[in-house]
Amino acid sequence: MAEELAPVFLMLGGIFALGLVADSVARRTAIPRVSLLLLFGVVLGGAGLDLLPRPGEALQNFLSTTALTMVAFLLGSSLSFETLRSRGRAILAVSVSVVVATLVLVSLGLWAIGVPLGLALILAAIATATDPAATQDVITQSGRDTRFTRTLNGIVAIDDAWGLVAFSFVLLGVQQIEGATTGTSVLFDLARDILGSVLLGLAVGLPGAWLTGRIEKGEPLLIEALALVFLLSGIALALDLSFLIAGMTAGMVLVNTASHHDRAFHEIEHARWPFLVLFFVLAGAALELSALLALGLIGIAYAVLRIAARVAGGWIGGAIGQTPRDERPLFGPALLPQAGVAVGTALIAAQELPQWGETIMALTIGVTVLFELVGPPATLWAIRRSGPDD
């Protein structure tokens, strides 16, 4: 028994030590700690020294669900009524504009170089997804609470929801074009997922807002925060709902209704870092760098078009949302990280459209690896280029 457990404890201790190193280096350099954790995982994982075991599916799912639910809570907390009153127009305009620009530019660009229109539309819909965990952690690491970071937090909180809606409509349309019959319930499933997830967030968030901070006045305990996170995650998984949308909704409810205390999210902020350390190091260990080499012309075009679409969409949305002119070119680079949501939608598309399944998965995995590595530094660069603290 002891011999079996020893490698597990050594692995966990080593990964947490890497977390300390990443945090220390990030404080002294311009490198995001998320990128350092991913690189540590790559070096020590199968693509490098092969010292870290590949995490089992159950462990990987547990870590990703826990970390992302915590991130969703914190992102929801950025949608306070005060923020929505002052920044709501900008958040809505930029988030919608980035999704629409990505759909239009990526699909037309891929179609222009010979990719079938249906496949181009599916790949463009997958490209709308971002990585909320990496983006939110870079914002936290920057230590800046500015107009730009508050707007960015709000955008990240809802843009994956817009992306999910866009993906579902595109998938349904492509299935009709291709003559597939498996997608007739896509709209019903979409409505169920979004509405059910919002209702779950309300069901957890409303009593949570009243109960937290009662045991020790003004100081919600860690156990309260963890109870909210794990209950919400468990119910969402049991009902096959989106824990991201549910967590964001619950966080928004708490920040706007828990008037008897003002630290509802501090304990989640403290608790999430160990989970993020494990999540990103093991995710780096699982990255297949060979996927980058297999991208080819279509993959390169896909990546370039996504970057151009994010920049264009951010600038247009910033103009519509009346953000300061010098911030408009920064939204696109700040929204480059891409991870699990993209792979999840790619899996659905590959299952529903098996004639393109291999191409969809190869391109999505390759581009996701690329944007996981270059996205966080781009986000940090954009934050530091934005206006001063206010």
Image: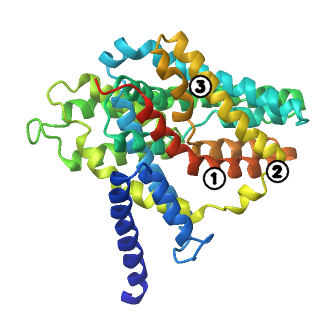
Labels 1 & 2 near each other (Cβ < 8 A)? no
If the image is split into quadrants, where does the N terminus sit?
bottom left
Task: State the SS at label 1.
Answer: helix
Type of residue at label 3?
Answer: Ala
Residue 35 seen: yes
Nearer the observer: mark 3 or 1; the answer is 1
- Counting other residues with Cα less than 10 Å from the Cα at mark 1, is it few (<14), some (14-19), or many (20 or more)? many
Looking at the rendering, which quadrant does residue 164 occupy? top right
Task: State the SS at label 3.
Answer: helix
Residue 183 seen: no
- Counting other residues with Cα less than 10 Å from the Cα at mark 3, is it few (<14), some (14-19), or many (20 or more)? few
> Which callout, 2 or 3, points at the residue further toward the start of the chain?
3
Tell me where residue 209 appears, x and y as whole percent.
24, 30
Residue drawn at the location 43% of the way across and 26% of the way down: 154
Give the residue at mark 1: 369
Q: How far apart are marks 3 and 1 (CA)?
A: 31 Å
Residue drawn at the location 48% of the way across and 10% of the way down: 322
> Which callout, 1 or 2, points at the residue further toward the start of the chain?
2
Residue drawn at the location 88% of the way across and 30% of the way down: 112
Give the residue at mark 2: 296
> Which callout, 3 or 1, points at the residue further toward the start of the chain?
3
Tell me where residue 119 appears, x and y as whole percent.
83, 36
Looking at the rendering, which quadrant does residue 138 occupy? top left
Q: Is residue 272 left or right of residue 379?
A: left
Type of residue at label 2?
Answer: Gly
- Counting other residues with Cα less than 10 Å from the Cα at mark 2, is it few (<14), some (14-19), or many (20 or more)? few
